[in-house]
Image (cartoon, helix red, strand yellow):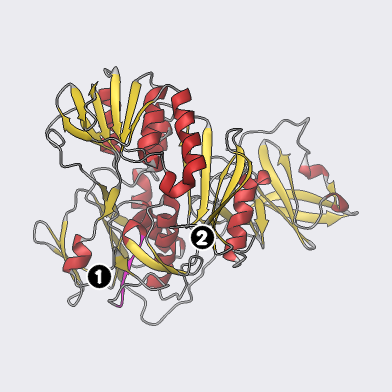
Amino acid sequence: MNAAPSETTSPDLTLGVAIDAIADGKMLAGHVGEDAVLLARRGNEFFAVGATCTHYGGPLAEGLLVDDTVRCPWHHACFSLRTGEAVRAPALRPIACWSIELSDNKVFVRENVATTPIIRVAHVREAPRKIVIIGGGAAGFAAAEMLRRQRFQGEIVMLSDDDAPPVDRPNLSKDYLAGNAPEEWIPLRGDEFYAEQNIELRLKARVTEVDVRAREVVLGDGKKIHFDRLLLATGAEPVRLPLPGMDDLPHVHTLRTFADCRDIIARAATTRRAVVMGASFIGLEVAASLRARGIEVHVVAPEKRPMERILGPQMGDFVRDLHEEHGVTFHLEDAATAIDPHRVALKSGVTIDADLVVVGVGVRPRLTLAEKSGLAIDRGVTVNEHLETSVPGVFAAGDIARWPDPHSNGSIRVEHWVVAERQGQTAALNMLGGRQKFDAVPFFWSQHYDVPINYVGHAAAWDELVIDGEIAARDCTVKYKHGGRVLAVASIYRDRESLIAEAAMEQGAGQS
């Protein structure tokens, strides 16, 4: 349930609000009883919906209205004002809706009404009877959930080689690893969800082959599963360094799965000093989480600045300074040459004592199944604008998919959680016969201590970097431009500007 707002600062919407007090395109946060409610106006229409995002609880009144939707300022979830449906990930659950009454030049919020998903795909004659999803991550789960939301009545078989049901992976390197989130927050849904929705979730399921001609998936035990439509959502796996000790020392870990995170937490309980290899987003989020547990942390990375390739030199310097303020020691322009049970040796000759080593040097897409199946590959699984591969009826989504991105005018593959979820949702609609283009603007967020960094768009390279505000003051937007066109925008504590930038990119307004 939403937290009850203070009645001294939040109007009781059942008592009515003057129509003229809410301008077109504006929102007002209020309450109905103990529920926080958002009143929004679009033209002469008024809407009353839950005021709190169902993803991480972001305040929707601080977000953005776009057409008949409201977008969350924190992680860009999007909800229908008409139905309450979560129409864009990362939120998957709807917000509540209330009825509206206009009387005496006032708008009154009345009864709570049922939320109803929007059916986006008309019934087709050749509707699939059985859909198989390979992968238990963001894309696979979002696809299965959307299939049932769209009232698909056929079979759904979800094959995951993990030993845990789909989890909220971003939390594994952030709050959960830091000890600030309870374990019950981590599963995307409880076990009962899969039974209630009649989704056959098979864990520890190893797929060895996809026979696209016979329309069959072959499992490690030799069993075969027929499909009418298939979604490949095999995700990515951590890069493992070719170092002595990397694979056989119990204190050396990578972070990808729930089990990985639990192992690191268990080891952290007796750790005095940790070495994190890699100054990527994951690596530095791990560093921040371990510092929250009071562990001394050393970060080893080959680059001159953390995350400079993605965020540029100014943001890279800021991120380094931020971590150093919290006690992290950096060993940049350096690399590990060996790991033994008690220390890490660096190329520079430095030796670091370590009770825990976390390797976060990046991931690689898991393409083996796609390659063996004869699908077109180009540094990822090649898909069209509908996320369909070179084989009709076989779709791909998430970290493995390379798609034609209309915003960057090229084909791209990104490893973002929100992108994977949104692609899973789009693939689900298209497996049911829809022809929905995947044209969402890429988005990700990263958290470093109390500093969130939001990033919209995709800039593989830029020739101009425009900073508004002060990065050091933690109040800024950074625009990455090429040929005068904005390709991406990073921001710190400018959530609404990040939403505005996203909406502008969607509309093709890249000049500014």
Residue 427 in the image, given as x and y percentages of width and height: 39, 66
Residue 161 in the image, given as x and y percentages of width and height: 21, 50
Q: Is residue 281 left or right of residue 468?
A: left
- Position of the N terminus, as image quadrant, is top right
Q: What amino acid is labelled 2 in the image?
A: Val
Q: Is residue 215 magenta?
A: no
Dividing the picture into quarters, in which one does residue 221 lie?
A: bottom left
Residue 431 in the image, given as x and y percentages of width and height: 37, 71
User: Residues in magenta?
Assistant: 392-397
Residue lying furthest bottom: 125
Q: What amino acid is labelled 1 in the image?
A: Phe
Q: Secondary structure at mark 1?
A: loop
Residue appearing at x 35%, y 41% in the figure: 303
Q: Is residue 456 left or right of residue 375?
A: right
158 vs 475: above or below: below
Residue appearing at x 27%, y 76% in the figure: 391
245 vs 84: above or below: above
Residue appearing at x 65%, y 44% in the figure: 51
Callout 2 environment at 10 Å: few (<14), some (14 to 19), or many (20+)? many
- Position of the C terminus, as image quadrant, is bottom right
Name the residue nearer the viewer: 508 or 387: 508
Mark closest to the chain's N terminus, 1 or 2:
1
How far apart are labels 1 and 2 at the CA level? 31 Å
Q: Which residue is mark 2?
A: 441
Q: How many marks?
A: 2
Residue lying furthest left: 222
Dividing the picture into quarters, in which one does residue 297 lie?
A: top left
Q: Which residue is mark 1?
A: 227
Residue 399 seen anywhere in this rendered image of the structure: yes
Callout 1 environment at 10 Å: few (<14), some (14 to 19), or many (20+)? many
Residue 71 seen anywhere in this rendered image of the structure: no
**Which callout, 1 or 2, points to the residue nearer the camera?**
2
